[in-house]
Image: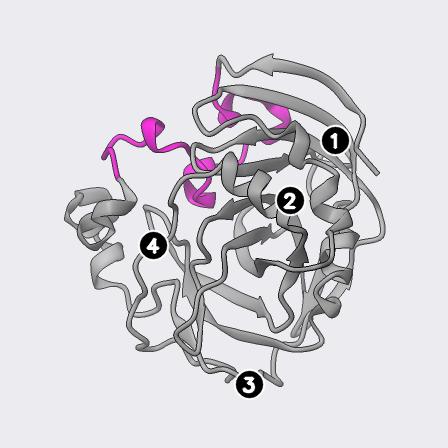
Amino acid sequence: MMFRALVSLAAVSSVLACPQHDFNTRALGIQKRADEPSGWAYATSNTWGANDNDTICQSGMTQSPINLPSGSFSKNHAPTFKYSAPISGALFNWGFGPSFSVNRTNGVDYSANPSFTFDGETVYLLSWHTHAPSEHLIGGVRTRAELHLVHGDASGTPRGVVGLRINPSTKSSNFIAQFIESTPGHDSSVRTQVDTLDMSLAIKEVGSLKNFWTYKGSLTTPPCSEGLRWWVAGKVLEVSDAQMQALLGVSVYSARVEQMVWNHAIGV
């Protein structure tokens, strides 16, 4: 089912200027490359740490993404999802692929947004965006794309990211079908206001993360902030060939180079 688009706007200001999205988009790692003062690019991701504001990209001990062991799923920090309510927000292209900035459902904070709980802590959906190809590797292998669901506390401070790897198959994705035809190109500044998007479909299509990897990690774009926990779904989100082509058609290369495992405590 396609979402109902209210109106498409030219983005004359950043997400920061919108009262519905006043959390730090740089901290979430979803700003466009052209908006980044350091002018970072994926072709030079090995040197992001040379920028005085992004030194953690080079010196950090839990940088993401990493290569995860195939078949060796985590047992600790299991997430319990509460994704029943649809969301509203802004669909746009962050310069590398589809992205979505979630409204504060209750108009005050994010505590009424879709959420999940782990280790007694509840985190709320703030935004999502895609990368192509996938950033995480499983047994040294990447998928065609990866969806990052960024979660934070009720005030909007990022706390964790759920990664869903995406590959073409004989199936189509009801989740992807909601927005893929309305996603602007990577060189577009159009923002489409959306009043209904069912995020529960994404979680259901990867088996509700019954199998997953988890580790201590970071944002995968400058400033590469650490202190986040990652969950990567064991089951791949399957899309049709046409959906895969459409996703790649509005994307450009956006995978950070694999980071060496250090203090990531995979599955611990």
| Mark found first going from the N terminus, 2 or 4 | 2
**Residue 82 x, y percent position in the rendering:** 79, 59
Residue carrying label 2 = 243
Q: Name the residue under label 1.
A: 107
In the rendered view, would you say 42 is above or below 34? below
Q: Is residue 171 left or right of residue 135?
A: right
User: Label for residue 71?
Assistant: 3
Viewer-nearest of labels 4 and 1?
4
CA distance for labels 3 and 1: 42 Å
Q: Residue 188: x and y, percent?
A: 48, 21
Above or below, 153 against 53 in this view is below
The residue mark sitting in front, 2 or 4, is 2
Left or right: residue 14 compared with residue 147: left
Q: Name the residue under label 4.
A: 256
Secondary structure under tag 3 reads loop
Q: Where is residue 83 in the image (x, y as percent from the top left)?
A: 79, 54
**Amino acid, disc 1:** Gly
User: Magenta region: which residues?
Assistant: 13-40
Q: Which of marks 3 and 2 is in front?
A: 2
Q: Which residue is drawn at 32% across and 65% down?
A: 258
Q: Which of marks 3 and 2 is nearer the N terminus?
A: 3
Q: Who is closer to the viewer here, 43 or 230? A: 43
Give the Cα distance between marks 1 and 2. 33 Å
Identified by mark 3, the residue type is: Gly
Instruction: For marks 2 and 4, give the CA distance.
Output: 23 Å
Q: Which of marks 1 and 2 is nearer the N terminus?
A: 1
Q: How crowded is mark 3: few (under 14 residues within 10 Å), some or many (20 or more)?
A: few
- In this rendering, is residue 267 above or below 33? below
* Callouts 4 and 1 close, C-beta under 8 Å: no
